[in-house]
Image (cartoon, rainbow, N blue to C red):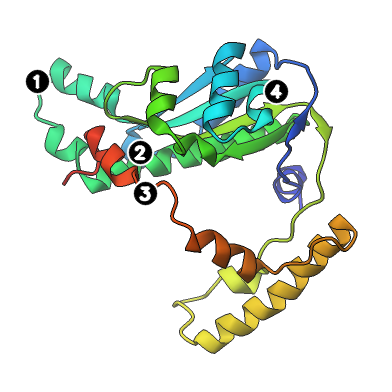
């Protein structure tokens, strides 16, 4: 165990921030930490948009589902899959790159690059005693987000990250036990093992909610996830992605 691992293992989402902006130096350190993440073939297929303008933050808070912590935080970052600069490389180098840029493979590379960068940024922020909360609601109304951030083709805003000084820190939510997610040599084949593990985890999560809410809530993880997955959400995504000239081939 060391300080880096302690920071990672101590993660929890923060949704209540002090009215205190991040400094220029803090923002730069977080972004530089993001840039230090691994990137496939040095392609660096992502961009980060920092939103300071309060009117834009307010509008984003509205379109992501009326989440107040999108508007009220120390700084709001939006992580984007970005192949726009690579399309410009085609012009600079006189290369036919579109078949590659529009492939599912490069789409996946841009998603992975952005996610790796974001997690580096999250760990960096938390190491500075800041709190963070990922905002997947950015994808609720991507056309509106696109207008607010003025993103061009070959760019997709993937998720936001609210960062700031915590006003309130929530309890740490228990993750799946290690043996649920770590397998050696091959994938677990026996569904009865999976179901037994899920039943055991349900007890942990139910007790967590019961303790946190004083008995007002004690649903299980499988109940929660089953209900969530039963609802269709963001079903426009494939059409939107392809309109951005990504994931076409």
The percent coordinates of residue 219 (x first, y second) are 72, 67
Q: Closer to the observer: label 4 or label 2?
A: 4
The percent coordinates of residue 152 (x first, y second) are 30, 21
Specify which label sits upstream in the sequence, 4 or 2. Answer: 4
Q: Is residue 154 left or right of residue 100?
A: right
Residue drawn at (55%, 88%) of the image: 192
Which residue position holds label 2?
A: 110
Q: Closer to the observer: label 3 or label 2?
A: 3
Q: Nearer the viewer, residue 43 or 55?
A: 55
Residue drawn at (58%, 19%) of the image: 57
Q: Closer to the observer: label 3 or label 1?
A: 3
- Labels 4 and 2 touching (C-beta < 8 A): no
Decide: few, some or many residues near mark 3? Use Cα within 10 Å; few <14, some 14-19, many ≥20.
few
Which residue position holds label 1?
A: 94
Secondary structure, mark 4, is loop
Q: CA distance from mark 3 to mark 1?
A: 37 Å
Specify which label sits upstream in the sequence, 1 or 2. Answer: 1
Q: CA distance from mark 4 to mark 2?
A: 29 Å
Q: Closer to the observer: label 1 or label 2?
A: 2
The percent coordinates of residue 154 (x first, y second) are 27, 29
Which residue position holds label 3?
A: 235
The percent coordinates of residue 25 (x first, y second) are 66, 14
Decide: few, some or many residues near mark 1? Use Cα within 10 Å; few <14, some 14-19, many ≥20.
few
Specify which label sits upstream in the sequence, 1 or 4. Answer: 4
Q: Is residue 132 left or right of residue 48?
A: right
Decide: few, some or many residues near mark 2? Use Cα within 10 Å; few <14, some 14-19, many ≥20.
many
Query: Which disc is residue 72 wearing?
Result: 4
């Amino acid at each position: 165990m060391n300080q880096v691992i302690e920071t990672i293992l101590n993660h929890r989402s923060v949704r209540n921030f002090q009215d205190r902006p991040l400094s220029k130096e803090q923002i730069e350190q977080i972004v530089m930490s993001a840039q230090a993440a691994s990137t496939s073939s040095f392609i660096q297929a992502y961009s980060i948009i920092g939103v300071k303008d309060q009117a834009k933050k307010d509008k984003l808070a509205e379109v992501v589902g009326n989440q107040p912590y999108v508007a009220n935080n120390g700084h709001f970052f939006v992580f984007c899959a970005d192949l726009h600069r690579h399309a410009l490389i085609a012009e600079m180098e006189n290369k036919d790159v579109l078949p590659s840029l529009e492939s599912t493979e490069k789409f996946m590379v841009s998603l992975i690059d952005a996610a790796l960068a974001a997690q580096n940024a999250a760990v960096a922020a938390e190491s500075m005693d800041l709190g963070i909360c990922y905002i997947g609601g950015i994808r609720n109304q991507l056309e509106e987000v696109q207008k607010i951030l003025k993103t061009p083709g070959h760019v997709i805003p993937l998720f936001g990250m609210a960062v700031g000084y915590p006003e309130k820190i929530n309890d740490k939510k228990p993750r799946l036990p290690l043996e649920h997610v770590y397998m050696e040599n091959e994938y677990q084949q026996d569904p009865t093992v999976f179901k037994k593990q899920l039943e055991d985890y349900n007890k942990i999560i139910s007790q967590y909610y019961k303790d946190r809410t004083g008995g007002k809530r004690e649903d299980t993880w499988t109940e929660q996830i089953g209900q969530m997955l039963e609802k269709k959400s963001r079903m426009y995504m494939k059409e939107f992605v392809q309109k951005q000239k990504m994931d076409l081939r």
